[in-house]
Amino acid sequence: MDFRWIAIAAALPLAACASSEAPVESTPAAPEAAMTCKADAVQSHVGHVASAEMGAAILKESGARTLRWGPPRSAMTMDYRQDRVNIMYDDAYKITQVTCG
């Protein structure tokens, strides 16, 4: 049995996948426009009643991309996201704290 033909037959499919083009320099894509939360801009809302409208206003004024409500006695993840505003409120739906992360 001629093993050269077996080696050639095995190499042919691999040769079909080879590219004759030079590799293209890859440059990282530009990051999305950062929507960084600014908690200082929304501290005036502490003490107000938590509502969907208030949440929308805080989201817009803080410059954040996402909003997370923090109901009383609730567990929250500790992951930090610079584009998220957190609104904590008490049993009376009064906003007690506004933070970023």
Image (spheres, grey):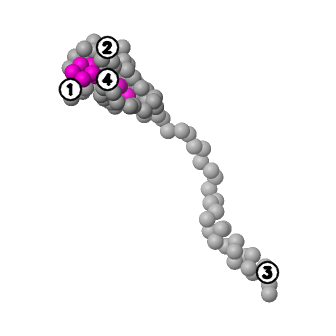
- Looking at the rendered structure, the kind of residue marked 3 is Phe
For marks 3 and 2, the one nearer the N-term is: 3
Q: Indicate which disc, 2 or 4, sits on the residue closer to the N terminus.
A: 2
Distance from disc 4 to disc 3, alpha carbons, whole Å, reads 73 Å
Label 4 environment density (alpha carbons within 10 Å; few <14, some 14–19, many ≥20): many
Image height of 75 relative to 19, above or below: above
Instruction: Give amino acid for label 4.
Output: Met
Asked whether 88 falls inside the magenta stretch, the response is: yes
What's drawn in magenta, residue-wise? Answer: 84-95
Q: CA distance from mark 3 to mark 2?
A: 78 Å
Residue 74 position by quadrant: top left
The Cα atoms of the two marked residues, 4 and 1, are separated by: 12 Å
Residue drawn at (33%, 27%), measured in percent from left and top? Answer: 73
- Mark nearer the N terminus (2 vs 1): 2
Can you identify the residue that label 4 sits on?
88
Which SS class for mark 4?
A: strand
Q: Position of residue 13 (x, y in %)?
A: 64, 71
Residue found at x 50% / y 38%: 29
Q: Secondary structure at mark 2?
A: helix
Residue 43, which numbered label? 2
